[in-house]
Image: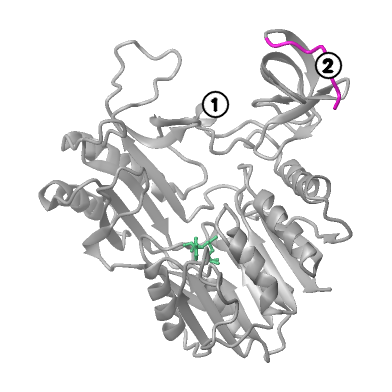
Amino acid sequence: MIETNIKKGQEYELTIESLAYGGKGIAKVNGFVVFVKNAIPGQKVRALVYRKRKGYAEARPLEVLEESPYKIEAPCEHFAYCGGCTFQQLDYEEQLNQKRRQVEELFIRQAGIEDFKVDEVIGADEIYHYRNKMEFSFSNRRWILPGEAEDANKDFALGLHVPRRYDKILDINQCFIQPELGNDILNAVKSKACELKLKPYDVKTHNGFLRHLVLRFGHNTGDVMVNLVTSYENPELIQPLADTIHEQFPQVTTIINNINTKKADIAYGEYETLLFGEPTITEKIGNLTFEISANSFFQTNTLQGEKLYKTALNGASLSGEEIVYDLYCGTGSISLFLAQEAKEVHGFEVIVSSIEDATRNAISNGITNVYFHKANLDFFFRKAAIKKDIPSPDVIVIDPPRAGMHKDMVTALPKFGAKRLVYISCNPTTQSRDIAQLLEDGYKLKKLTMVDMFPHTPHIETVGVLEKS
Ligand SMILES: C[S@@+](CC[C@H](N)C(=O)[O-])C[C@H]1O[C@@H](n2cnc3c(N)ncnc32)[C@H](O)[C@@H]1O
């Protein structure tokens, strides 16, 4: 390990070489790594070291001494505080270069995986207003911005969490990654909720009514869902808010109320009541139409989602004869694309409403060779990898949540004997960990493709194709 005389509380002139996974700038002092907040590659900054650990230090910039050639003006008024789109001031091409470099770093240097092909990053054509789902939180603890008056109203906010503050919400007027209509609905809900004197939920005392506003958009259909998450059911309180949304935004096709009585701060109810319109919205990807309910997973960038599915389908390289498993299948979107090129597809998923959506989607799209199984994959295959009533797979597609696969699922996977695995992930850290294990168990990583589903954020989606060696 390189040691240094870098000290906490001292200032240094640092040149930012690259971005670490997560978004901090990386500078080096005699080979010693310093992570610099809110700094981009190519900048020279005067920075204050506020933390020193074994092997690295952390600093915050005090002054930009030389500007980066990749710097652009961040369009969002909330950029300095929100923490959602931390790459907004970095030219988009350079965002893609940095994401590719980070993924290579994780796979090659950290996980020790060698000898595989890395494709060009598949970038987005629309880099703003691309999200088809946004979750905002109501709060009685508004984040007060520097320079605001002492007596500013702190008691109401509708917006996004301030980084690392579970209890504070930054009030948002305009978010550049959701459709413009979303911003209009956000502001209308905010002013009507204040006018009706509806109490925002307090995450510390667990009092209050309004918890979250979740917006979903059918990018290719024009459908719009407004999901109001509350801490208890009270039609008299919620209906006037729903009526206003309906009157002001006739394009909204669903208004739904999810009731989350639990303490966990999630925009997900134990049950829901329909306040207006249809219980689900529809979205189209390629030749398929999907019904999506409030709590079901669906790729949050429709346009890039289509590119992601094409990448996965190419990776699966199906001839029409294969049995395919789609693990963590959500509403079955990948399953239905796979089914059009396979003999039979089996999707596995833990959320019941997603399985129900998936089954409905298969029927409405006229796809009959796909079967969905409710399964918690943390232990479903623990005892026996092969289930008697499900044929064994030739190809397995895996698309787990950010935490990656449960270790028992990784252990069970090689026992299926599938010739090919296609591992899709929104978290290359856990994906590289799981893939490193699969390489020990007889697979070889052939190819890695990155699809940028989330421009301006540190996130990247990766698709790894593994074959039995
Ligand atoms: C990244 S999403 C993938 C969805 C789907 N492949 C798609 O593209 O729409 C991950 C899915 O895994 C599901 N999931 C999370 N933990 C699970 C578990 N332990 N067992 C089964 N499914 C799980 C989630 O509900 C979610 O639908």
Q: How many marks?
A: 2
Q: Which is nearer the N-term, disc 1 or disc 2?
A: 2
Can residue 287 be seen in this snapshot?
no
The residue that mark 1 highlights is 80
25 and 251: which is toward the camera: 25
Is the magenta region chiefly helix, strand or loop? Answer: loop
Say the numbered circle drawn on residue 4: 2
Image position of 216 with respect to 165: above or below? below
Q: Is residue 23 above or below residue 317?
A: above
Instruction: Give the x, y percent position of residue 212.
Output: 33, 45
Q: Is residue 307 left or right of residue 367?
A: right
Q: Which span is picked out in magenta?
A: 1-8
Q: Residue at position x 38%, y 30% from top?
A: 167
Q: Nearer the viewer, mark 1 or mark 2?
A: 2
The residue type indicated by label 2 comes to Thr
Looking at the picture, tell me which residue is in the foreground, 111 or 279: 111
Q: Is residue 115 left or right of residue 83?
A: right
Q: Quadrant of the N terminus?
A: top right
* SS for dot 1: helix
- Residue at 19% across, 48% down: 232
The residue located at (57%, 38%) in the rendering is: 85
Figure quadrant of residue 257: bottom left
Residue 273: image tag: none
